[in-house]
Image (cartoon, rainbow, N blue to C red):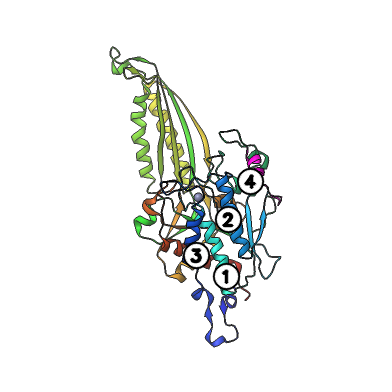
Amino acid sequence: MEEFLHFIGRNCSQHMIPLTNTIRINPERLWSRIMEMAQFGATPAGGCNRQALTDADKAGRDLFIRWCREAGCDIRIDEIGNIFARRPGGEPDLPPVITGSHLDTQPSGGKFDGIYGVLAGLELVETLNDAGVTTRHPLEIVVWTNEEGCRFDTAMMGSAVWSSAMDLDAAYALVDCDGLSVQDELRRTGYRGSRTTTDISVHAAFELHIEQGPVLEDEGKAIGVVTGVQHMSRHRIVILGVEAHAGPTPMALRKDPMMALSIFLPQLYALAAEYGPEGRVTFGFIQVEPGSPNTVPGCLELTVDIRHPNAGNYQAMLERYRECVRAACDSLGLSVEMACVWEAPGVVFDSGCIDAVRQAVETLGYSSRDIVSGAGHDACNISAVAPTSMIFVPCENGLSHNEAEAITPEQAETGANVLLLAVLEKVGITG
Ligand SMILES: [Zn+2]
């Protein structure tokens, strides 16, 4: 770190005050913009339905671009509709520091998931403008297209294309339930840009986001220093037995898949506890056939979602899961098929970016804890191609993907100030 760059009043060296001790975001401006953005796709229950590339999403994007232009940013839009709003740096050839998130929401989403990170980025630009600061590196605010993956069924789509984790044509070909494609909707809304998605050179990246879980609130911490994202996978289990009459068939002579479930279900909950507190096992879908009250089911289908932040523990949980299910079925003479239907490897964020967040928290005197994200974010894709980390703020009752999703103006201010100082560390200051 070039210490001298972090001081203002360079002509009176005896009384230099670090800029990081004085510069702060404008909380009222940030909050009013979050509330104004929430008008697009507003739902009666106080949430937002602003799914990717709908008219509401277009209106939100248009407003964001207007605000950025008014703040002096140059706007570029890439082929998948990601928006890059650049505040020039003093050394234009240097790669930008980027920060941002997404403006799209779930069908019954909230005002903050994604939006907060985007508008905090804009607030940083306004704050630097107000303070008359010139940074060495350019600063770019990024809006990633279709993070939620609800209208078009691929979450984190825009950042996946940008980072080459997903083919552009495959993304264009995704269709919604009315048969409308991403490509058609990008054209219709005017957001199919020309900037190549392979033009990647980024000095550092930060994503500020609500936690979407209850840990920070439960522990009374103001900031989550996000060190990475969990390993996660989804599995489908199908167990075949023999349908039989519920009355005449003695228990010992049944081929009942539910008996296998009764063995391995407690074992897998115990497994999550054994690898706790970070181990996660979720049975989100379960179905028996034929689904008749007086028939022993002949078929059981269920899903298991398994997560852990530590690679070794995650792999161990996967092995133990397969052993438990196999052994339970074998003991009852049942046939079983297990398939992994989706897997996202965990992410370890960049230590330099994490340190910048830690330093910002320390300077500001906020309480914090390290945390591993349980959900996927655009930052996962970005981290494959650029030094990246995330900042979490608590959200009320840990709720998100919910119209009741809420943070306080103070929480919004806290997170944005941490983002400001972390970004300043990476962009450097020339004047
Ligand atoms: Zn989000």
User: Badges 2 and 3: C-beta atoms under 8 Å apart?
Assistant: no
Q: Quadrant of residue 303?
A: top left
Residue that appears at 50% across and 75% down: 22
Find disc 4 in the rendering and name its residue: 189
The nearer-to-camera label among 4 and 1 is 4
Find disc 1 in the rendering and name its residue: 128
Q: Is residue 152 left or right of 320 when viewed as pictured?
A: right
- Tell me the kind of residue under disc 2: Leu
Residue interval drawn in magenta:
181-196
**Mark sitting earlier along the chain (4/1):** 1
Looking at the image, residue 73 lies above or below residue 154: below
- Real-space Cα distance between discs 1 and 2? 21 Å
In what element is the residue under mark 2? helix
User: Badges 1 and 2: C-beta atoms under 8 Å apart?
Assistant: no
Q: Is residue 431 left or right of 401 when viewed as pictured?
A: right
Looking at the image, residue 338 lies above or below residue 59: above
Asked if the magenta segment contains residue 191, the reply would be yes
- Real-space Cα distance between discs 2 and 4? 13 Å
In what element is the residue under mark 1? helix
Find disc 3 in the rendering and name its residue: 29
State yes or no: Cβ of the residue under disc 2 lies below 8 Å from any atom of ligand 1.
Answer: no
Q: Badge 2: few (under 14), some or many (20 or more) residues near its Cα, within 10 Å?
A: some
- Real-space Cα distance between discs 4 and 3? 28 Å
In what element is the residue under mark 4? helix
**Mark sitting earlier along the chain (1/3):** 3
